[in-house]
Image (cartoon, rainbow, N blue to C red):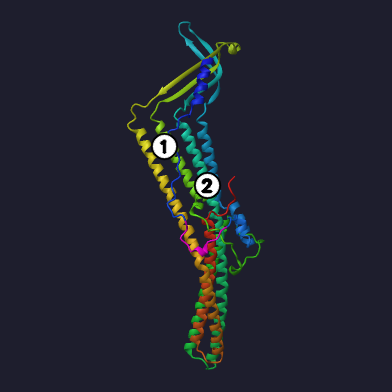
Amino acid sequence: MKLKLAILAAALSLAGCINLAPDHQRPALPVADQWPMPAAAQTAGEALAWPQFYAGDARLVALIRIALQNNRDLRVAVLNAEQARAQARVSDANRWPTVSAAFIRSRNNLPAADNTTPGYQAGLQVSSYEVDLLGRLRNQSDAATARYLASVEGTRAAQITLVAGVAASYLALQADTEMEQLAQATLKARTDAEALTRRKFDLGASSALDLATAESASAAASAAYAQAKRQRAQDESALVLVLGQAIPADLAAAQPLEAIQLPDAPAGLPSQVLLARPDVLQAEQELSAAEANIGAARAAFFPAITLTGSLGSASSQLSQLFSNTIWTFAAQAAMPIFDAGRNRANLDATKAAQGIAVAQYEKTVQTAFKEVSDALAGRATYGEQLDAQTRAVKAADDTLRLVELRYGQGASSQLDLLNAQTQAFAAHQSLVQLRMAALLNSVQLYKALGGGLAAKS
């Protein structure tokens, strides 16, 4: 008996001592070492966590916290990670013997004696334990663990995406709120101009063409106002969906876009910083799982050694059950001789899956590099564009003020006034849109560089 236990212990110690999986090597980055951006746009510093990055707007910080607690997509991502962790534990448990306690009562018919004999057995059983000499079970466990780690990184990526999504939805809602206010003010101005033109027409001081022009301008402003209200309501619904609940009424007041200031994300860094992005780490873990699957597929070509055994007692009398000790031990080695090419096809499939994982990893890195490059290009140009558009708004406002004075004195026509109002309205709209775009660009750059989640434990 001691010899059998020694054999079993030796088998356990040797299990998994040979690993047929390829060594993991991180693919070289298929991107340039530096970002293609002007040197003047580079900054350096440590990445801020999202509460510090958005600290200038208390309402936005509160909305992000709500979304992280209630967003259903993030909840699914977290549960997927929990499921993957449980599956990894199941796969790891397959590497160890399963020990069961059993009690058996049987009756044996003996025709010669013309009677039946009862039998009782009790003890411990080890059924079909595979000695993992070539690491098949170990690699399956490693693959499951890598998939779990990939799901964890996927959850972190979902958090980063959610934080950026809440910020984008919030900024879009603020922009549409300002657009609605702008459309409302324009509608009032054109309605007043229409009323003034109608009085002039009634007094004979204005033509029917002037009145028709004023009515058309007022109707156009009314349509623009209705569109702005609809867009704002739709953006509010989009924000509610991202939050996972209604917007609380007790939040801090919203800030106008002009007052929102986001810090510069550190961008004076080499492209290797992309390796810390959760989606890149997720792709690398998927590659590790594919490599482990190759090891398991290779091991299938070799003999599989399984052990079974039991230790207990047996008796024909229940009262004497524990007086007789019995044990069994069996070892089996089975090697595939003919499987119609199943193992070869499975190995080819795992190798192809590894190639796919490498390509997906490289594509993930390339996509991340493009996201950072695009955001950096935006940061280098949005400032200049905003300055130019601010000057254009001032010029359009000055023009409108002068035309209104001339129109009141009869020196400018109704068409001149309408053109000045239209240009001023369009200039203000463009400024609001540019402010939102510049802020969104900062959000996207922050997200592209990793999002600023707390460091992993």
Task: Report the residue at 42% width, 33% height from top.
Answer: 20
Task: Report the residue at 39% width, 28% height from top.
Answer: 302
Amino acid type at circle 2 is Glu
Q: Measured along the vertical axis of the image, is residue 428 above or below residue 292?
A: below
Task: Report the residue at 50% width, 19% height from top.
Answer: 7
Query: Would you say residue 288 is visible in this rendering?
Result: yes
Question: Where does residue 231 sit, x and y in percent of width and height?
Answer: 52, 67
Of residues 137 and 449, the one nearer the viewer is: 449
Bounds of the magenta span? 34-44
User: At numbered mark 1, what does the secondary structure look like: helix, strand or loop?
Assistant: helix
Residue 199, picture quadrant: bottom right
**Residue 294 numbered mark, or none:** 1
Query: Would you say residue 226 is visible in this rendering?
Result: no
Residue most toward the bottom?
204
Rate crowding at label 2 as few (under 14), some (14 to 19) or many (20 or more) other CA atoms within 10 Å: many
**Residue 221 numbered mark, or none:** none
Q: Measured along the vertical axis of the image, is residue 114 above or below residue 63?
A: above
- Residue under label 2: 153
Q: In the image, 247: left or right of 16?
A: right
